[in-house]
Image (cartoon, grey):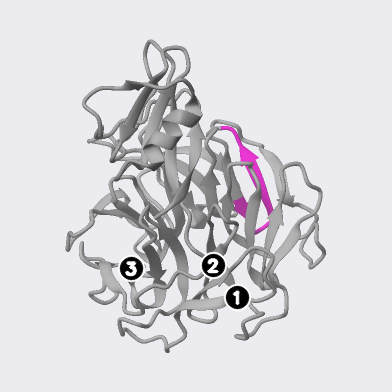
Amino acid sequence: MCGGFARIDNWDIHGNDILPSPVRQPDYASCCSQCQTTPECIAFTYSPSSQRCSLKKSMGSGGYSTGDSLTGYYLIPNIPVDARWKQNGVTVAGGHGKGSASNQLDGPEGLFINDDQTMVIADCWNHRIIQWKMGDTNGQVVAGGNGNESRLDQLTRPTDVLIDKETNSLIICDSGNHRVVRWSRHRGTTQGEILIDNIDCFGFAMDDQRYLYISDTGKDEVRRYQIADKNGTIVAGGNGEGTRLNQLNIPTYIFVDQQQTVYVSDNWNYRVMKWNKGAEEGILVAGDQGQGNALTQLGHPNELFVDTLGTIYVAEWGNHRVMRWPKGAKQGTVIVGRNGREEGANQIAFPTALSFDRHGNFYVVDRGNHRIQRFSIE
């Protein structure tokens, strides 16, 4: 799987080294070239001052380097525009019917997959965040699960979650309590803390500078926050509900690329919008042909992913499918779904979230069937 490298300044990517010790390379490009021509290299660190090039075949949690400043780079897969996936998915979490047992989910919404392939799931109607290691049959509750009220040890209908690696914590959209909360991942944590209150949050993303982007379905906008900032800055929408290019209508999930471009699932406008950094209006990149199931249409788009080629992948809640829209295309193609919404391996019902791993396999939150499905790239 070919790919491009995303840069994280002053960040030492930990992991299993391919070489027994760092090698000297004259510049970043030479280190990058060596990584790309070395089997299994998915990340590397390079220090210009010492010309140290360290190649990685896995990624650990990462951490700030002491001493010499290292700059880390990790691989983002370039998925070929004609890639195909197996049409029968494999259940990797849930799939035992609707329920609250440790092997069950109830209306899951958001999904985050960590570098070690651990899944963190916003288990919406169980009012909890559950962590699921790949290959396990049971998950572990890591936040909430204590009823659906507003105490700090409780969540109400969480819709999205991500891991903030710098603080080793979960950031959670606690939508029913109109707040964003943070829960430490350290052992013994029993409650969270409020980061932002009085917000109709639904989905969010974090860029490599640790800015947090949050969609607000009540104000039809997306704001960017620094951690501990209560107000934020509008980066998309914010001009009332509507269909104009500077408006949104129930924005749900968002994706932010390395240039801080914001892609928004404009759910009730049945479209995906792209907002460049500093822009006052968005650019239509998918849909906007009304609600329907034609290849030019989107039916309530939810979570989306944009690869390094600019191809958009979007989970369609209303059409029970996942669509691929190449950059500049006027219509998409169905990559999975559209086979009914029962519990078959080739079926998904009301998909809400999706995520890719470094190999190009993707994972879908099959909300209606209370499970997470993995579809392997062919």
Which residue is more in the foreground, 249 or 311? Answer: 311
Which residue is more in the foreground, 18 or 138? Answer: 18
Q: Is residue 224 magenta?
A: yes
Q: Which residue, given by chain and number where applicable, does mark 1 sit on?
A: 332
Query: Considering only order in the chain, which callout, 3 or 2, is on the residue closer to the N terminus?
Result: 2
Q: Which residue is located at x 49 percent, y 51 percent?
A: 173
Are the residues at dot 2 and dot 1 in contact (C-beta closer than 8 Å)? yes
Identify the element where label 3 is drawn. Answer: loop
Distance CA(mark 1)–CA(mark 3): 20 Å
Question: Which of the two marks, 2 or 1, is nearer to us in this view?
Answer: 1
Q: Which residue, given by chain and number where applicable, does mark 3 sit on?
A: 376
Which residue is more in the foreground, 291 or 142? Answer: 291
Residue 112 can be seen, yes or no: yes
Placement of the C terminus among the 4 image quadrants: bottom left
Q: Amino acid at mark 2?
A: Val
Distance CA(mark 2)–CA(mark 3): 17 Å
Q: Amino acid at mark 1?
A: Gly
Q: Which residue, given by chain and number where applicable, does mark 2 sit on?
A: 314
In the displayed structure image, the side of residue 268 where residue 132 appears, left or right: left
Are the residues at dot 1 and dot 3 in contact (C-beta closer than 8 Å)? no
Query: Where is residue 116 shown, x and y percent of the image?
Result: 28, 46
In the rendered image, which quarter is residue 16 located in?
top left
Q: Which residue is located at x 26 percent, y 73 percent?
A: 95
Q: Amino acid at mark 3?
A: Ser
Q: Which residues are magenta?
A: 215-226
In the displayed orientation, state which residue is furthest to the bottom: 340
Which residue is more in the foreground, 180 or 317? Answer: 317
In the rendered image, which quarter is residue 311 located in?
bottom right
